Amino acid sequence: MTWTYLSPPPVHFAPGERTGRYRTGLDRPVVGDDGQARISDEDYAAALVDEIDNPRHLKRRFTVGY
């Protein structure tokens, strides 16, 4: 069975602006220059669709953030 699990950031995950830009990570939250892990709902959804269209994390958990 093939699976993929997309983990949201632990704190800053809320509606916002879709930027179309994000970074991916594996076992640790992706943090910005300010040390905060965050992403908008809109970019999180885009990352999920991107992973479906172009699988890069098969049989693995990953996360996204700015």
Image: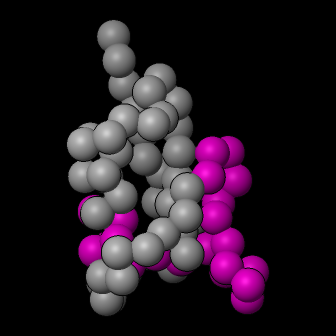
> Foreground residue, 2 or 55?
55
Q: Find residue 50 and report its horizontal and vertical position in percent.
A: 30, 52
Q: Is residue 29 magenta?
A: yes
The answer to which image quadrant residue 18 occupies is bottom left
Q: Locate the N terminus and report the quarter of the image it occupies.
A: top left
On the question of residue 11 being in view, the answer is: no
Q: Is residue 1 above or below residue 52?
A: above
The number of numbered badges drawn on the structure is 0
| Residue at x 67% of width, y 79% of height | 32
Q: Which residues are magenta?
A: 25-45
On the question of residue 37 being in view, the answer is: yes
The residue furthest top is 1
Colour scheme in the image?
Answer: one colour
Q: Find residue 35 and report its horizontal and vertical position in percent.
A: 75, 80
Q: Is residue 29 above or below residue 20?
A: above
Q: Is residue 36 shown left or right of residue 15? A: right
Q: Is residue 5 shown left or right of residue 26? A: left
Q: Is residue 37 shown left or right of residue 46? A: right
> Foreground residue, 15 or 22?
22
Q: Find residue 4 and report its horizontal and vertical position in percent.
A: 40, 33
Q: Is residue 48 shown left or right of residue 11? A: left
| Residue at x 36% of width, y 65% of height | 44
| Residue at x 55% of width, y 75% of height | 66
| Residue at x 73% of width, y 84% of height | 33
Q: Is residue 26 magenta?
A: yes
